[in-house]
Image (tube, coloured by chain):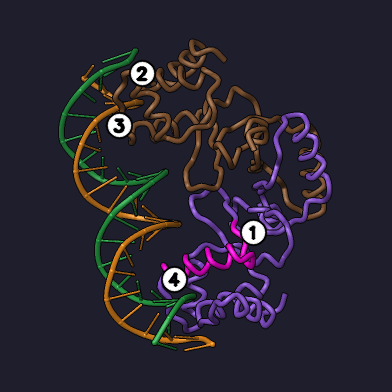
Chain colours: A purple, B brown, C orange, D green
DNA sequence: CTTACTGCAAAAAGTTTGCACACAC
DNA sequence: GTGTGTGCAAACTTTTTGCAGTAAG
């Protein structure tokens, strides 16, 4: 979805087009990895914007609620945010250099979930799945 | 592994058998779900022990480091700890009642990892995988 | 008696809240 | 002008650190 369409939808719902909102949507448009509030804020500051961290937290929560942003968690005590329009994917987190890659897990996971659902009588609605290891670059450098 | 063997191994390595250590190992022996530091501490307090939270954090980190405890994260801002001797498994977290079930995901995940490793040139060492949804009990009650 | 372990208080680090003010429309 | 959005300070939650004192062996 392009930014204009997003803005139109927000307007239609009675929300306003503010500089925070626009700058975040723009940032997320640029093929952004899942970044923390702090990283996002620093990016914005570098581009000349001054925004309070509270504002960023609130706006990220808002955009997540509206379905434009998705949250992820790598188990290191902070939330990460990225565009929802990338489609459902998981991450490859390099323990050596911290680099974050994306990976789409093919149908297999769905079938795992179906099997578990039946076996455990549990209706699975969502999941967290992240992979940790060593990226190609770091394997070479060893 | 029984507690006596664990204690023997710890002793061999020059560590001491303290009341904190013993009480945690006992607690984890009893088919315990992944609990947070606070929950663990409350359990211990109910059983008559008084332990400082710092001590518990430190001991959990120690036991995790020694391989007796494993950590998990459900993306809600706190770590959870359970016995390593349950074997590798994942969790079914009910969004309705908070109940935590366990599930062993069969070989499929390994083959997914192998496929991703080749496709992405990434050496996968570990993963986080947790499922969220509605448990059988809560489905009935709706 | 040695050194691993513990408790306490304080600090970090991430996130949330309350309230007065500002800005979009 | 109305209601959404923002900034600031302060609170809250989880986790970590420093250091003096305790206890296991």
Q: Which residue is mark 3?
A: B52
Front label number (2 vs 3): 2
**Residue at screen point 64% across, 69% down:** A32
Real-space Cα distance between discs 2 and 4? 44 Å
Residue A99 image position (x, y, % from top left): 62, 59
Q: Are marks 1 and 3 on the same chain?
A: no
Q: Secondary structure at mark 4?
A: helix
> Subunit of mark 3?
B
The answer to which of A21 and A93 lies nearer the viewer is: A21
Q: Which residue is mark 2?
A: B47
Residue A105 image position (x, y, % from top left): 78, 51
Label placed on residue B86: none
**Residue at screen point 66% across, 49% down:** A130
Which quadrant of the figure contains the N terminus of chain B? top right
Q: Decide: few, some or many residues near mark 1? Use Cα within 10 Å; few <14, some 14-19, many ≥20.
A: some
Residue B74: quarter of image:
top right
In the rendered image, residue A55 lying in the magenta stretch gets the answer yes
> Subunit of mark 4?
A
Front label number (4 vs 1): 4
Q: Which residue is mark 1?
A: A100
Q: Secondary structure at mark 1?
A: strand
């Amino acid at each position: 979805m392009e930014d204009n369409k997003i803005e139109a939808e927000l307007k239609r719902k009675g929300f306003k087009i503010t500089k925070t909102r626009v700058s975040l949507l723009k940032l997320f448009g640029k093929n952004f990895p899942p970044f923390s509030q702090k990283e996002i804020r620093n990016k914005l500051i570098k581009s000349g914007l001054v925004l309070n961290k509270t504002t960023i937290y609130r706006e990220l929560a808002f955009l997540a609620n509206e379905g434009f942003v998705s949250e992820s968690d790598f188990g290191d005590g902070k939330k990460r945010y990225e565009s929802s329009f990338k489609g459902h994917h998981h991450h490859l987190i390099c323990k050596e250099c911290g680099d974050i890659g994306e990976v789409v897990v093919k149908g297999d996971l769905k079938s795992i979930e179906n099997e578990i659902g039946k076996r455990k009588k549990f209706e699975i609605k969502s999941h967290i799945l992240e992979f940790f290891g060593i990226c190609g670059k770091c394997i070479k450098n060893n």
